[in-house]
Amino acid sequence: MGRIAGGAMKRSWAIGYVSVLAASFLPAMVVAVWLGAGIDEDAYDWMFRHHPPTGSATGSILLAVDEQSLMDTNRAPGLRGLLAEGLERLAAAGPKAVAIDVILADQGDPAQDAALEAAFRELPNLVLACDMIDDGRRWEDALPRFRRLAAASGHVHVDPTTGGVTRLAPLEKVAGQDRRWALALEAYRLSRGVKEILESPNDLQVGALTIPARWDESRAIRIRYRAQPTERVTFWELKSHPELAERFRNRVVFVGVTAQSAAPDRHITPLSDARKIAGVEIHASIFDTLAGGRMLVSASHLQVAGWCFLLALAGVAAFAFRSGWQAYALAGLVLVAAHLGPYWLFAHDVIFPYFAAVSAAWLSTVGAGAFQFLTVRRQLRRSEAQTARYQQAVHFVTHEMRTPLTAIQGSSELMTRYNLGEEKRKQIADLINSESKRLARMIETFLNVERLSAGELELKQETFPVRQVLEACLGRARPLAERKQIRFEVGEVADALLTGDRELMEYAIYNLLTNAVKYSPAQTVVTVEGRPDGQHLRLAVRDQGIGMEQHELRKIFQKFYRTGRAVESGEAGTGIGLSIVEQIVLHHGGRIEVTSAPGNGSCFTLVLPVKDNRGHI
């Protein structure tokens, strides 16, 4: 039975730790979905600033309209004239591709438009910008005279996320039924001599490059901004120093406005803090991301759930299999892994939700640590209570044993020292036998109550009539009652069946009968009856003794507690009989009720579940 109790405790611990695991993993997932997006993006930005991408040049360069160039247009005939003049010099250098981040949808000065059209005609792999208008129902394109000279049209849409920071670039956008690829993607395709982009649900294939971009997410990719900004030459610098045109040779050129006073699209990036940069710089960064070949890939939902579950499992296991400093050291390692894991994965081009991992680790370690602490505290209190109980029991039993041991010791000395007559020797022998039996009963009773309390006394499961048990107990108790001229008066007793351990039930009923006899005056009556009460039987034993005070009723079933009536009556006892009775009744699924008052006797009622009621006697 000790092994069974130990197994039950282990099962309880296992259930507790499994509950902690579930209570940490599931809320971590829910909270991460609802509250973690902002924290994840902030962590992503922090990691980006502390681990910016590095690598060789990707071949991109900016031809920018800055503030000085705009001032020059005030003296020259407009922005389109400036573009035409600069693009003529650019064309002579022989770039690989040119992407114009200016929407040329309106009619301009005829002379400037003609000059710009002539410049476009000289540019290789020209990509013109377009944008969605009318709430995304149609595209705003360049004038037909310009568009017919372009090799492709690319959209300039980007997706600012949490906090207005531009982290994602959709490579595909659809207005109405017309789909367009991103300006940077078209520039990359043309610069590599690729005629067609191959598609699958999860990626795009551009020549030798595979881009992980899902179709149901607008083919969005994360932009790998470089620590050093893209090389640039302004229109004013190119006009002042024509030799700078050589910088554009065999490179992909992004042309756009960077002047703060004129650029309509400006964005915050993870590297720019609160400073906004022009849209043309964003498109150049998208091209750099594609040309660099290293894409930032978001971990799948299954990978996130699996890693968070492993963290939660490790946090719980640290306290389930270790204790003390070892458990806390292991829990610390789990927390370190949760905090540093997303950074390590980012360094290997994987974006992992920071908040989900940290939540799973902290909830599991704190929960498991608290569970272990509370469990150990509960065991400590139980151990202290058991120690106090055993000390009290040993002290009381030792005290109680003195009387029979003294009688046995004194009687044996009389028999050895003196030459006693046969009758006297028989009296002393009977006394020794009686006291030794009393001592044996005392020890057996003490052991029984401890076995019941510890769950080590296995109950049989048998069905027996309650009347037979009661009659057997009455037969054993009558000799004791006749000595005090006490009469048992048996009232109505239901013919019901009980299920359990017959011997223990006999012990309980016999104990109540003998107690009623012990604590009743001579020549009185002890009443016994058993009435049905629904699915229960109420078996009552009522005496006409001295009764008990109310404060005694609250302690009557405590082990080793002796009532005032026991002291006044002079009856010997250990004070544990009623404790055993209560344990027996509880183990049989019942309860025991007591009513008593000084001078009015006591009534002990066993309320027991019955299997069947078949009439009365």
Image: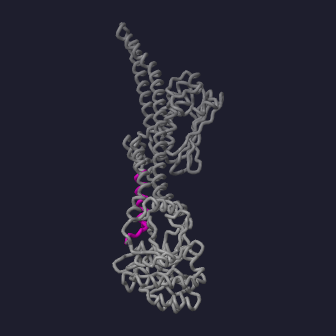
Measuring from the top left, give residue 604's x and y in whole percent: 58, 36
Q: Which residue is more in the foreground, 43 or 591? A: 43
Give the position of the N terminus as an image quadrant.
Answer: top left
Q: Which residue is more in the foreground, 25 or 115? A: 115
- In the rendered view, tell whether residue 61 sits above or below residue 40: below
Measuring from the top left, give residue 107's x and y in whole percent: 59, 89
Residue at image location 42% in from the left, 44% down from the top: 328
- In the rendered view, tell whether residue 362 sits above or below residue 235: above
In terms of image quadrants, where is residue 565? top right
- In the rendered view, tell whether residue 283 sits above or below residue 590: below
Is residue 297 located in the magenta-colored stretch of the structure?
yes
Residue 323 shown left or right of residue 560 in the figure: left
Colour logic: one colour
Farthest residue toward the top?
418
Q: Which residue is more in the foreground, 300 or 430? A: 300
Q: Which residues are magenta?
A: 293-315
Number of numbered discs overlaid on the protein picture: 0
Residue 103: tell me if it is visible.
Answer: yes
Residue 30: tell me if it is visible.
Answer: no
Residue at image location 35% in from the left, 80% down from the top: 207
Q: Which residue is more in the foreground, 246 or 603? A: 246
Q: Main secondary structure of the magenta part?
A: helix
Give the position of the C terminus as an image quadrant.
Answer: top right
Measuring from the top left, give residue 529's x and y in whole percent: 58, 40
Measuring from the top left, give residue 431's x and y in whole percent: 42, 18
Is residue 42 located in the magenta-colored stretch of the structure?
no
